[in-house]
């Protein structure tokens, strides 16, 4: 394996000193909490997933074994480990094992396929990949074995069998991959003792996560976060969302809430608030690897779930569950709704049906986590906004000249303790997104005099489908390879449940293609299904700027006119 990787961040000594002195960065590692809760509360539950319920003691033992197993396989501080796993316990164990030895986790959502994963691997160069054997009928393990043949920087592949696999049967692994149990045994019989592991302990300002997000070009950007930055994201959630909330009865920690997460842990929402938050707080996280609102209601009743978070479609789905009014939702106190503004009719219905559960709005990005949040006691007029900035962070809206404005639409900028350490492409690339110390989010917003923002749209070229960013340019480029497509442009079309879907505007090259023709082609090209356009408009010509660029805002106007 290669030597420790150097990550070029935006963390100058001045920024580190400022936030450390003010207490904004607490210089703590999540691993300290893992060690504490595993020792103090070994019999309490920490994870419930498709495999059952795991205790803190069992979790601590597995983190210890996997961290040593990774060392046996040659993983060292600064090396990237890619995780493409569903919402299973193995994701949490592997992440914490990597952090213990100073490795950098690259979470990847399990919906991604060959095209997207190849690009991410080429950019991140992970030395080891941990993935599921299969997920929702797709053989992830086989895909990664194929990718490994052309990604020679991946020296080890670890495959996790699903919950239905026979624990006593020898797993059928592709290539020379190893199983999750092999990794555990590598650690159990490792020559590395606790003292050796402790020598690799990372610093709080070391990079520990690198997650890809699609930007204005549609190409993934590697967003880097440190231990300190991720700790802040958890702290501000606990401060704002959990204000006035009592921990689970009988819990041995002051903030040991029972949390729920159905958003993938490979997305920053799941990574921060489905994994790091409950582990930090000594809580219990109940995870769904496939979203099912009826199942979720049953999980609330069974495990007395208190907290949950997801995009607006999650909330709408819960409200549509048959017989909801007769179910016992008394433990559920908070639902943080982010990814799109909450429609007022949905919020009114939630207030009517969810009893003591307060639905709160929020806005964030991979680059900064949850940065604006409402207050638990906000009136409904406030809860249909996107909230206001959390502690030690600021947002502002500026006009075309860069001057701050109120009650008018402009560009949304932010700064503070939650802001990422930089893009993996380097300081020069990252600096292009900064203006006078403020990060340009690419979103358009309106801010009122009390600091509450309302997202008005995006200057960046994205479609956000159910809270998931669709890399528009990448999909357009694939469509342009179809023989019946002359020019293609994808724009966001409003959708009642998902917030937005992709609509393809196509100028045909000969006989116009159908939507089925295009999606079949995308399937052949191994493009993730959730990224496929779900509507098609054939045009004779596109509205263009004088410089020859398609005026997408004019394409979107056709939906307003319909």
Image: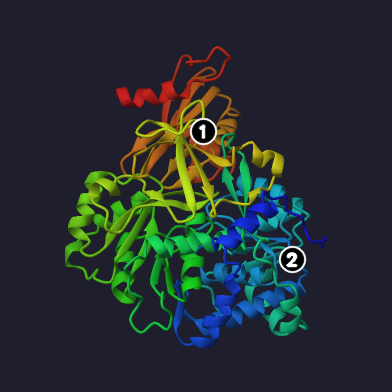
Quarter of the image for the N terminus: give it.
bottom right
Against 318, is 191 above or below?
Answer: below
| Depth check, front residue: 68 or 370 | 370
Q: Quadrant of residue 293?
A: bottom left
Hey, which residue is sitting farthest top in the picture?
A: 546
Secondary-structure class at tag 1? loop
Q: Is residue 455 above or below residue 106?
A: above
Q: Where is residue 335 shown, x and y percent of the image?
A: 33, 59
- Residue at figure coordinates x 39%, y 55% from the top left: 310
**10 Å crowding of disc 1: few (<14), some (14-19), many (20+):** some
Judging from the image, what secondary structure is the residue with disc 2 in? Answer: loop
Instruction: Tally the marks.
Output: 2
Check whether the beta carbons of the residues at disc 1 and disc 2 lie within 8 A of each other.
no
Percent x, y of residue 326: 17, 67
- Tell me if residue 144 comes above or below residue 490 in the rendering: below
**Residue 261 visible in the picture:** no
Residue located beneath label 1 in the image: 461
Q: Earlier in the sequence, mark 1 or mark 2?
A: 2
Image-quadrant location for residue 308: bottom left
Work out how far the residue at label 1 is from the one at label 2, CA to CA, in angstroms. 36 Å
| Point 48% across, 14% down: residue | 541
Q: Which residue is mark 2?
A: 77
Q: Nearer the viewer, residue 397 or 442?
A: 397
Quadrant (top left, top right, bottom left, bottom right) of the C terminus: top left
Please give the label number shown on residue 183. Answer: none
């Amino acid at each position: 394996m290669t030597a420790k990787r150097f990550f070029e961040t935006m963390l100058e000594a001045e920024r580190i000193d400022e936030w450390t002195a003010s207490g904004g960065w607490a210089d703590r590692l999540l691993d300290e909490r893992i060690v504490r809760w595993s020792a103090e509360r070994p019999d309490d539950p920490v994870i419930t997933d498709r495999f059952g319920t795991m205790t803190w003691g069992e979790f601590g033992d597995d983190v210890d074994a996997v961290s040593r197993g990774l060392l046996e396989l040659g993983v060292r501080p600064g090396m990237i480990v890619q995780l493409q796993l569903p919402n299973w316990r193995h994701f949490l164990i592997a992440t914490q094992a990597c952090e213990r030895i100073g490795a950098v986790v690259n979470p990847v959502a399990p919906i991604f396929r060959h095209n997207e994963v190849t690009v991410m691997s080429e950019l991140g160069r992970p030395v080891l990949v941990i993935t599921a054997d299969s997920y929702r009928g797709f053989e992830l393990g086989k895909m990664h074995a194929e990718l490994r043949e052309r990604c020679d920087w991946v020296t080890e592949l670890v495959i996790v069998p699903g919950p239905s696999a026979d624990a006593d049967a020898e797993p059928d692994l592709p290539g020379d991959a190893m199983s999750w149990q092999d990794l555990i045994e590598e650690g159990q019989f490792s020559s590395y003792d606790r003292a050796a592991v402790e020598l690799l302990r990372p610093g709080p300002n070391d990079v520990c996560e690198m997650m890809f997000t699609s930007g204005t070009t549609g190409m993934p950007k590697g967003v880097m976060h440190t231990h300190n930055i991720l700790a802040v994201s958890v702290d501000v959630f606990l401060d704002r969302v959990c204000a006035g909330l009592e921990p689970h009865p009988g819990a041995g920690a002051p903030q040991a809430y029972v949390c729920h997460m159905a958003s993938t842990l490979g997305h920053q929402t799941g990574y921060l608030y489905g994994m790091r938050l409950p582990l930090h707080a000594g809580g219990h996280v109940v995870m769904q690897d496939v979203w099912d609102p009826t199942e979720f209601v049953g999980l609330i009743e069974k495990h007395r779930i208190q907290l949950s978070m997801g995009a607006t479609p999650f909330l709408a789905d819960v409200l549509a569950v048959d017989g909801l009014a007769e179910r016992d939702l008394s433990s559920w106190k908070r639902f943080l709704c982010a990814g799109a503004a909450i429609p007022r009719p949905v919020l009114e219905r939630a207030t009517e049906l969810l009893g003591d559960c307060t639905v709160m709005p929020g806005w964030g990005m991979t680059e900064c986590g949850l940065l604006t949040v409402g207050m638990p006691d906000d009136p409904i007029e406030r809860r249909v906004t996107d909230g206001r900035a959390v502690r030690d962070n600021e947002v502002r809206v500026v006009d075309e000249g860069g001057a701050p404005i109120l009650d008018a639409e402009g560009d949304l900028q932010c700064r503070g303790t939650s802001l990422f350490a930089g893009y993996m492409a380097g300081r020069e690339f990252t600096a292009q997104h900064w203006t006078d110390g403020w990060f340009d989010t690419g979103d358009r917003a309106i801010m009122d005099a009390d600091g509450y923002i309302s997202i008005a749209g995006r200057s960046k070229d994205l479609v956000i489908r159910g809270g998931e960013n669709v890399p528009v340019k990448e999909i357009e480029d694939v469509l342009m390879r179809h023989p019946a497509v002359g020019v293609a442009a994808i724009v966001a079309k409003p959708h009642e449940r998902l917030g937005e879907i992709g609509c393809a505007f196509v100028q045909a090259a000969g006989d116009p293609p159908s939507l089925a023709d295009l999606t079949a082609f995308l399937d052949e090209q191994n493009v993730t299904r959730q990224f496929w356009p779900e509507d098609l408009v054939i045009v004779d010509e596109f509205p263009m700027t004088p410089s020859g660029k398609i005026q997408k805002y004019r394409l979107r106007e056709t939906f307003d006119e319909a």
